[in-house]
Image (spheres, helix red, strand yellow):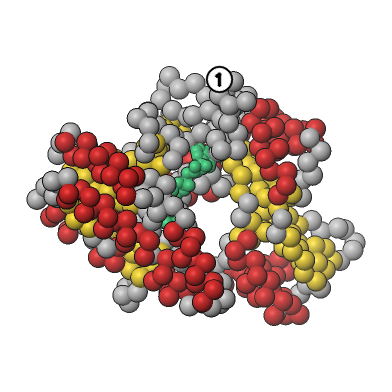
Amino acid sequence: MPRIVMKFGGTSMAGIERIRHVAQLVEREAEEGNEVLVVVSAMAGETDRLVQFCKEAAASHDPTEYDVVVASGEQVTAGLLAMTLQNMGRKARSFMGWQLVRASGVHGNARVDKVESDLLSEALTGGTICVIPGFQGATEDGRLATLGRGGSDTSAVAIAAGVGADRCDIYTDVDGVYTTDPRIVPKASKLAQVTFEEMLELAGAGAKVLQVRSVGLAMRENLPLRVLSAFEDKTGTEVVAQLGEDMERTAIAGIAADRNEARVTLTGIADETGSLAKAIAPLAEAAIPVDMIVHAATQGVGKSDLNFTVPRAQLAKALALLEARKDELGFEGIKSDDRVAKVSIVGVGLRSDPALASLMFETLAERRINIAAASTGEIRASVLIDENDVELAVRALHKAYGLDDDNQGN
Ligand code: ADP
Ligand code: ASP
Ligand code: MG
């Protein structure tokens, strides 16, 4: 029997009516002869609400207790979906994340090490639909851990890999992966297929339709992944190792924007070997990711500035860590700006055509958008700009790279 994982996001689970609709989609797959596992998110807005409670309870809270609080939203929807399926005459039951998902690393952003699949396989063989709360697992010492915002996607892929599923379907509030966020650019085009590699870069650059870790995991496991609408019966997007031969594709697959970064400038760093590594070492020790590093020593001056970005949510912590060891780390001053955003273009075409990246700079210059920093990877080019310019930049780039679908939007 084919085994499939269906994952439903927050909008799809927001309220009993929608959960009933989800139950019907699940039933349809079961009736077609599949063994079905369902991974669910909390109702839309619920995790934000729980995060806010934590902030109000204690500005600087224990991350272990944060996980206990924020993981609860998924428990509610898992139980509700299981009872809805039972009410429809189906054999269904929920499992909790701690029973199945072994996680480690930082609380609030833990990674999945292993999925215990025995309980699930037993239930599936007995004809039971397994409903599993996404986002949660447990550490070796028996504490709840959550997998980072958007982590239910990763739960779904990890569980699919763990039970040897034939495919993993991610049902969400858009009907596939688009060339950019269709809520920002109504003319965005739906991609029939996208490669794991491109999706990994798009997700890493802020396209939140899939959590980046879920894509990395699916790529390693070579697990067929689809993104589909939970509301409309339409063909979605397939995430594949290689595009089908008949796939028509512009050189750039898509554009992503990320408003969750903040810029840090360390001034007066000595131009000597090892000074950069030393200056940002405290961030690495605290597992704060550093991106968009820009540094250029001015010859003869002896001192220069180091610019980089950190996740906005970790800016205060990063500044405190750096400030506390200022003298030892070897810089004179520290500045920050949390009104920046990163805009990226992604496509395998960037490998072979350097002119594609310069079109990005020209397009932004024409719109008088200032670039504070730029970085390029093998299939991605990113710029850091003022947060207020994001929509204009994304729209202009989308058009410049020939991605507008003129039959859509305005
Ligand atoms: P879910 O709750 O189902 O996990 P998310 O809100 O996490 O849903 O992800 C879906 C959202 O991702 C869409 O509503 C859309 O606004 C956003 N998005 C960003 N970039 C893209 C893209 N390139 N293609 C499709 N959706 C995108
Ligand atoms: N509910 C969690 C969040 O909002 C996980 C998810 O929806 O994927 O981040
Ligand atoms: Mg999501």
* Residue 163 percent across, percent down from the top left: 23, 51
Q: Residues within 10 Å of mark 1 (few under 14, many from 20)?
A: few
Label count reads 1
Q: Quadrant of residue 68?
A: bottom left
Residue located at (66% from left, 27% from top): 399
Residue 154 or residue 12, whichever sits in front: 12
* Quarter of the view holding residue 401: top right
Picture quarter with ligand 2: bottom left
Q: Position of residue 177 (x, y in %)?
A: 47, 36
Residue 360, percent from left and from top? 71, 35
The residue that label 1 is drawn on is 407
Nearer to the camera, 23 or 5 = 23
Q: Is residue 228 visible?
A: no
> Compared with residue 16, is residue 169 higher up or lower down, i.e. above or below?
above
Look at label 1 and name its amino acid: Asn
Determine the residue positioned at 32% across, 77% down: 141
Q: Is residue 331 above or below residue 256?
A: below
Residue depicted at 58% across the width and 31% down the height: 186
Image quadrant occupied by the N terminus: top left
Q: Residue at x 74, y 60 (%)?
A: 337
